[in-house]
Amino acid sequence: MPPALPEEAVTRRAWQDGPQETVIARELAGEDAELIRRVAADLVDTMRAHPGCVGLAAPQVGEPFQLIVVEYNEKEDDEQPKLFILANPEIIRSGSDQEVGTEGCLSIPGFVGDVERPAAVTLRGLNRRGKLMRVKANGWLARIFQHEVDHLNGVLFIDRAEKVWKVEEGPSQVIPAD
Ligand SMILES: [Zn+2]
């Protein structure tokens, strides 16, 4: 059973129909800025409605677009987590160091798994105004970005995990390391 959702989130298809990963997401253009803003607002609302959720991809809420949002505190004392909204996110560089981390996903409530991924990535994409931007990410932030970009390509963490197991309390999108 997924946890109870706030009223405004119950229509989200990610919860009602299960994973929406079968659709390969459509690319967005600079002139889609209005669409980017609308879908991003939906993603941010849904992400924030789920404590522990630090990222979401548009196909998870039934929107077949290449759009992700990520909100994560790099440092624990960072009161204001940084919000990233990225359309057409593309990983243009991956570090050679690999790290294993335990991931979960709103689309697969109640399960987590150990996934090995590059510890650092550089991404390119469009920001919420449809302008090209570049993001460098390390550690957990890099992992979250890779997890969300995978969603746009129909790949789930269970496809990459070396080990998957059931947890009592779901669902965090990505569980930060202790
Ligand atoms: Zn996910």
Image (cartoon, helix red, strand yellow):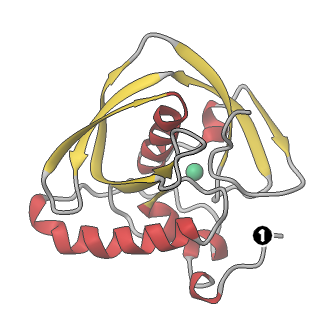
Query: Of 59 and 136, which appears nearest the observer?
Result: 136
Where, quadrant-wise, is the N terminus in this rendering? Answer: bottom right
Q: Quadrant of residue 92?
A: top left
Q: Quadrant of residue 140?
A: top right
Residue at x-position 41% and y-position 50% = 152
Q: Position of residue 130 (x, y in %)?
A: 15, 59
Q: Position of residue 159 (x, y in %)?
A: 62, 36
Where, quadrant-wise, is the C terminus in this rendering? Answer: top right
* Image position of 78 (left or right of 129): right
Query: Of 65 and 145, which appears nearest the observer?
Result: 145
Give the residue type that dot 1 points to.
Answer: Pro
Residue 96 vertical position relative to residue 32 in the rendered view, above or below: above
* Image position of 51 (left or right of 4): left
Residue 56 visible in this rendered orientation of the protein = yes
Residue 62 visible in this rendered orientation of the protein = no
Residue at x-position 52% and y-position 56% = 21
Q: Residue furthest top?
A: 96
User: Which residue does the numbered mark 1 point to in the structure image?
Assistant: 2
Q: Position of residue 126 (x, y in %)?
A: 20, 51
Q: Quadrant of residue 76?
A: top right
Q: Position of residue 79 (x, y in %)?
A: 53, 54
Query: Within 10 Å of the Cα at label 1, are there few (<14), some (14-19), or many (20+) other Cα atoms?
Result: few
* Image position of 80 (left or right of 166): left
Q: Secondary structure at mark 1?
A: loop
Q: Residue furthest right?
A: 168
Residue at x-position 46% and y-position 33% = 142
Query: Of 7 and 16, which appears nearest the observer?
Result: 7
